[in-house]
Image: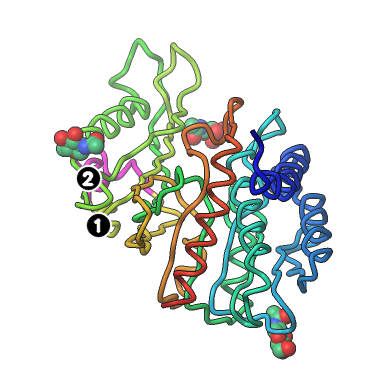
Amino acid sequence: MTTPEVQQAIKPCTILFQLHRTLVEIPSVTLYELEVGQVLEAHLTSRGLTVDRQQVSEDRFNLLAYKGAVNETRVLLVSHIDTDGYQIYGRGSVDDKASVVAQTFAFLELLDTLGEGSVSILFDVGEEAGGAGINYIEANIDYHWDTVIFGEPTELKLGVGHKGVYGGSLKVNGLAAHSGYPELGIDANGILIDILSNLRGIEWPSDELLGNTTLNVGVIEGGAAANVISANSSAQLLFRVTNGIDLIDALVQDAIDRTGHSDRVEFTGTHKLPPVYFDYDVEGFESIVLAYGTDAFGLAKKQIPHKLLYGPGTIHVAHSATEHISTDDLLEAVQGYKSLIKWALEQ
Ligand SMILES: *[C@@H]1O[C@H](CO)[C@@H](O)[C@H](O)[C@H]1NC(C)=O
Ligand SMILES: *[C@@H]1O[C@H](CO)[C@@H](O)[C@H](O)[C@H]1NC(C)=O
Ligand SMILES: *[C@@H]1O[C@H](CO)[C@@H](O)[C@H](O)[C@H]1NC(C)=O
């Protein structure tokens, strides 16, 4: 039997599911977020919010929506509107459009009770590849939020923290020779294999809360032909770091030195982002440790007293062809965000 309360609830739910469907149906792989941005802008404007565009580059903008005229608020909700990879049915349904929609509805449902300057919502571009949108905020917007609530799939739990990342590349310069006369060459592939083997034996710094630092060797290249001693080789490394990010260079160097070919090897580290910790002790919420990065990296230099990470869905299906979200989770996330906004306003 459908009670009046349930009927009352059905209409907003329908609008919520419709918005989610609309957003998922619009492809918004990184760099092509324009249309999704326009749809959200129209939706938020139609609900009476002030919406500012932050032009990150031509055809790409973040949206910041707030009540009235005060753009700097105590609490900020953030999620990203780009998705990873190409449009497959459901792509982005979790990461991150479920959070986008749930944050939007939580904000709209609380709107009448909120004063100007209390809450705003930011939808940014480029999170899946380099963080262009959030980096724009870090560089250009000097607001002092008390609390930022990041929306990412956390299975409706509060993220305790997430690992940092450290990427780097190894390059080995060898010397080509006929494979029948290996003593005349310097085998770049062989040296690389030894280094990688040494790396696999290393126990990387770990952290009680965030667990082990892990290393992925995602790309290996090298050599020219089976009958030629390889003249060069390379590997791309990506560490998911829980602790001791500044110790990694020395550990990698040690793995290189142990091959006896340090003079032939170059390790170049890039994007080094330490782990991020969040507030997770909020009544009524379980907590979860996460291994993926978020927009919180981009705001690392800002002093934000409280950071929360929360959202519907699981990262385990995100970025895949089976990405999906349950309607119950979407509805629960709206309630979750409402509770977190209220918690944040009480801090
Ligand atoms: C925020 O509002 C203030 C006051 O109206 C204004 O001076 C400022 O330019 C606005 N900031 C942005 C990023 O639009
Ligand atoms: C973390 O590393 C330790 C030591 O190598 C290992 O025993 C443990 O199983 C690892 N934990 C996880 C969750 O992989
Ligand atoms: C090896 O060197 C050649 C010639 O400079 C270059 O074309 C090739 O991309 C290099 N391969 C690797 C794996 O670095």
Can you say whether 73 is above or below 285 in the image?
below
Alpha carbon distance from label 2 to label 1: 8 Å
Q: Nearer the viewer, residue 47 or 133?
A: 47
Residue 306's image quarter?
bottom left
- Asked if labels 1 and 2 touch by Cβ distance under 8 angstroms, the answer is yes
Label 1: which secondary element? loop
Give residue 204's mark.
2
Q: Earlier in the sequence, mark 2 or mark 1?
A: 2
Can you say whether 130 is above or below 140 in the image?
above
Q: Nearer the viewer, residue 90 or 58?
A: 90
Check the picture and name the quadrant holding the N terminus.
top right
Label 2: which secondary element? loop
Does residue 82 appear left or right of residue 245 in this picture? right
Residue at (42% x, 35% y) in the render? 235
Q: Callout 2: few (<14), some (14-19), or many (20+) C-alpha neighbours within 10 Å? A: many
Residue type at mark 2 is: Trp
User: Residue 341 location, x and y as percent?
Assistant: 52, 67
Residue type at mark 1 is: Gly
Check the picture and name the quadrant holding the C terminus.
bottom left
User: Residue 234 location, x and y as percent?
Assistant: 43, 35
Can residue 30 be seen in this snapshot? Answer: yes
Residue 301's image quarter?
bottom left
Magenta span of residues = 251-267
Q: Callout 1: few (<14), some (14-19), or many (20+) C-alpha neighbours within 10 Å? A: some
Give residue 244's mark.
1
Give residue 144's mark.
none
